Image (cartoon, rainbow, N blue to C red):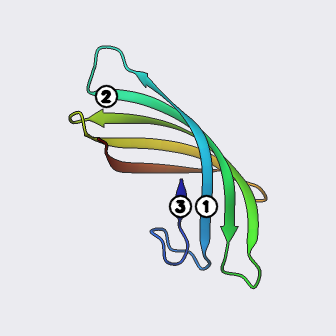
Amino acid sequence: MYENSGFDGFLHTAFGEHTESAGLMKNFPLPRTKVVSGYTWVQTGLTSFTGNARVQNRLDSSASLGAIIHFNRHSSIWIQESYGKVVTMPWFTTSSIGYGWSW
């Protein structure tokens, strides 16, 4: 995963911030439905604060819980809530929504 939430990203900040991370995702079926499934996602990586005189790199980690709404075999929408931590900063939560297409 790559995220840019700095001054030129979706979430504007006074300084640049880029995150590169890798993780493990586990999908699971929800009872009595074939349209919606759930997933958990644990990841860790490196966050770089780029707006200062020196780049500051920090270890980050997060855990996410989400749901996927399947429209057909190829397209879906996912919704997730994440609980994360960047070393030297307080814990934070983020909510996300996205569209996925696969072949």
Furthest residue to the bottom? 53
Q: Residue at x 59, y 79 (%)?
A: 14
Classify mark 3: residues with Cα within 10 Å, few (<14), some (14-19) or many (20+): few
Q: Earlier in the sequence, mark 2 or mark 3?
A: 3
Q: Residue at x 21, y 36 (%)?
A: 71
For mark 2, what is the residue?
Answer: 36
Furthest residue to the front? 103
Q: Are marks 3 and 1 in contact (CB under 8 Å)?
A: yes
User: What numbered label is drawn on residue 101?
Assistant: none
For mark 3, what is the residue?
Answer: 3
Instruction: Name the amino acid type tagged 2.
Output: Val
For mark 1, what is the residue?
Answer: 19
Res 68 quadrant in image: top left
Circle 2 SS class? strand
Q: Disc 3 to disc 1, how far (Cα)?
A: 5 Å
Q: Disc 1 to disc 2, how far (Cα)?
A: 29 Å
Residue 53 coordinates in the image, percent (x, y): 75, 85
Classify mark 1: residues with Cα within 10 Å, few (<14), some (14-19) or many (20+): some
Q: Earlier in the sequence, mark 3 or mark 1?
A: 3
